[in-house]
Image: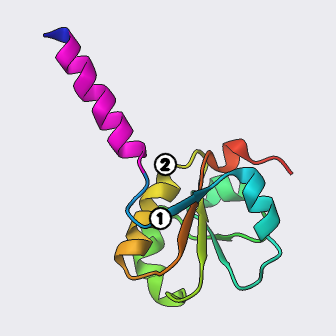
Amino acid sequence: MGWIFIALIAAFLVWRMKPAKGVQTMSADELKDRLKDQTIQFIDVRTPTEFKGRHIKEFRNIPLNLLPGKLAELNKEQEVIVICQSGMRSSQAAGKLKKAGFTSVTNVRGGMSAWQR
């Protein structure tokens, strides 16, 4: 009986970490090659305090909880790359962007924890 509980927890964790349908992922190393592209919208969904402590200058801070109210400020036809601290919140944000009709959304795996300049 205990193994069923463990299997359910493992399945839930895998499901939570799976990217939303249609959302691309990239590593922090792959992100470095994209930062000079001025046609990309770079969004950091961490809190203002986290962003202030350490961030990538090309990224705009829109905390995850404020993202739904800021969608009108973003271009749905332009690529969006999303980052957070570990990749979990940005995965949620990427899913919200995709559901809102954004055509090209990419989540940075590992987030700022994986970032090294």
Q: Which mark is residue 56?
A: none
Camera sees residue 54: no
Residue 71 visible, this angle:
yes
Image position, residue 99 (x, y; %): 34, 74
Between label 1 and label 2, give the one nearer the viewer: 1
Mark 1: which secondary structure? loop
Residue underneath mark 1:
23
Which residue does the image show at 37% across and 63% down from the upper left?
Answer: 21
User: How far apart are labels 1 and 2 at the CA level?
Assistant: 13 Å
Residue 44 lies in the magenta stretch? no
In the foreground, 7 or 60: 7
Give the x, y percent position of residue 92.
Answer: 42, 58
For image coordinates 60% across by 49% down, the residue present is 109
Label 2, secondary structure: give it: helix
The answer to which quarter of the image holds residue 113 is top right
Classify 37 as above or below 21: below
Mark 1 or mark 2, earlier in chain? 1
